[in-house]
Image (spheres, grey):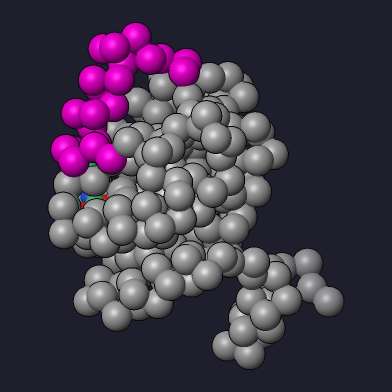
Amino acid sequence: MSRKTINLTDDLYAYLLSISLQESAIQRELREETAKHPMAMMQIAPEQGQFMALLIQLINAKNIIEIGVFTGYSTLCMAMALPDDGRIIACDINEDYTNIAGKYWQKAGVAGKIELRLAPAIEIMDELLDRGQAGHYDFVFIDAEKSEYLDYYERALKLLRPGGLITIDNVLWSGKPANPEELDKDTVAIRDFNKRLFKDTRVNISLLPIADGLTLALKL
Ligand code: SAM
Ligand code: CA
């Protein structure tokens, strides 16, 4: 036993998935197609998708914004957790990636819950705010350009209702933020972002060492 998070060996990770991952055949198919993609490492881990789906159910989320779709695995996990009248605004800038996503959303029968927006996420979030949608959303997932995390986050806070949840991916960024010698743009951005969030009195946070690190921020 340990008071620190357990170190996941490959065998232990395989065990964890074998006794907890409850994926549909279509989720698995999408994950298998994505695994062959040159940018496969961008996809969230399947147990993270399942965890986010559970969060969505826990807070009875109906309206979601996703920043960074790629081949749509995270979107699919979230859409499957939503009620029939739930909606996701899914933002990305790459049509090749999202064409793959669309195929699987259709197959899974959740395409009607997903509004794909192909434009820079900051523009889309500003448009939603201009349309008077501040306080309208229950859940936001941030997983696009790391140097823009703070810009997404500030807009997400406005778009979220009190009691809504922002989830931010890759906050441990392969461990690089903990090494002060790592000074590349994305690492510095994530390190600064984590510091800002730690001091932000508008939210309660929890940083989970799941996959590449996921911070939950509950809007007070
Ligand atoms: N959530 C996805 C999943 O689990 O499969 C992975 C998202 S991937 C890490 C990041 C995505 O953000 C890419 O598909 C990229 O095209 C998109 N992206 C990059 N810059 C963006 C921007 N300014 N606005 C919206 N999407 C952007
Ligand atoms: Ca990610």
Q: Quadrant of residue 203?
A: top right
x, y percentage for residue 189? 29, 49
Left or right, 193 with respect to 99, comes to: right
Farthest residue to the top: give it: 132
x, y percentage for residue 200? 50, 30
Residues in magenta? 116-136
Farthest residue to the right: give it: 1
Instruction: Assess whether residue 130 is covered by the magenta stretch.
Output: yes
Q: Is residue 173 above or below residue 145?
A: below
Taking the image as drawn, is residue 179 in sight? no
Left or right, 183 with respect to 208, comes to: left
Q: Nearer the viewer, residue 210 or 39?
A: 39
Q: Quadrant of residue 216?
A: top right
x, y percentage for residue 8? 62, 80
Left or right, 50 with respect to 175, comes to: right
x, y percentage for residue 220? 60, 22
The residue depicted at 69 percent of the width and 39 percent of the height is: 58
Instruction: Assess whether residue 84 is covered by the magenta stretch.
Output: no
The residue depicted at 26 percent of the width and 75 percent of the height is: 37
